Amino acid sequence: MSRMRERLAPVRLAWRVQRRVLGALLLREILTRYGRHNIGFAWLFIEPMVFTLGVTALWSVIHAGEGSSLPIVAFALTGYSTVLMWRNMPSRCITAIEPNQTLLYHRHVKVLDFYVARIALEAIGATVSFVLLALFFAYIGWLEPPENTLKVIWAWIMLFWFGAGLALLVGALAYRNEIVDRIWHPLAYLTFPLSGAAFLVDALPPRARDLLLWVPMVNAVEYLREGYFGSVIRAHHDMAYMAVFNAGLLLVALAQVRKVARRVIPT
């Protein structure tokens, strides 16, 4: 037992150092982005809540859920919240290196840490926003609790995995070529109609349904809605395909981050 502890001691020390680095970077990101004034870091989750509430109100006005048996509030919450989960992380990672480059003089700080801190911050904001809005809508009677909470959690984890891999890849490519920064934002908006956030796959013709399930996030959105609404809807998904896609995306992204890390020079 004592030998095992001695062998694990370097691992525990490395983990403590890594945890402190990421904690410091998270705090730095919060302070530089939201400051100490007004409501400060609360904007972390209030900002996505405002976006989701705005989209919910807009969809209610235009009757976007017409033809569906789901309440529009439930449809918007389970749709647009998922978009915030994967779309904001790449946008933040595009500019992750330049403002933090001087921190590379500290030997424990790596380029990957900049990306991880921003990804974690966006994921925390989107998750807190989703949970608080779900609890609020359930409290006022506009939304029923999920039928299968584990499915909702698993779908959320898969969306985080996809968003994190995409963020690392886009962030690394944008550092090497600024045209990635230029095309990512319009591309993210163009991808929104294909993300599954604004429609149920079951409402589409079979051919379109099969094609759309090749889009990874559609599978997670369908799985989340199945967990939330159960038998009320007929969901279509292939989570094994999404897991394979996410794993491949993350491997490619980490390889690109490694290439970028070799080029970055502390300034």
Image: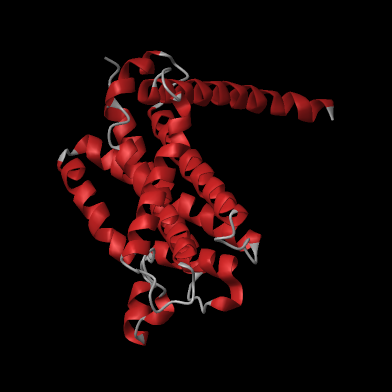
**Image location of residue 156, percent across then percent down:** 52, 54
Depth check, front residue: 20 or 149: 149
Depth check, front residue: 46 or 199: 46
Residue 252 visible somewhere in the drawing = no
Judge whether 36 appears above or below 175 on screen.
Answer: above
Depth check, front residue: 220 or 146: 146
Judge whether 193 appears above or below 180 on screen.
Answer: below
Judge whether 214 appears above or below 251 on screen.
Answer: below
Question: Which residue lies most toward the bottom here?
Answer: 206
Write the residue at 83% across / 25% down: 2
> Where's the C terminus, which quadrant?
top left
**246 displayed left or right of 188:** right
Q: Total number of numbered labels? A: 0
Q: In the figure, residue 203 lies in which quadrant?
A: bottom left
Colour theme: secondary structure
Q: In the figure, residue 36 lies in which quadrant?
A: top left
**Image location of residue 261, percent across then percent down:** 33, 30
**Image location of residue 140, percent across then percent down:** 58, 54
> Where's the N terminus, which quadrant?
top right
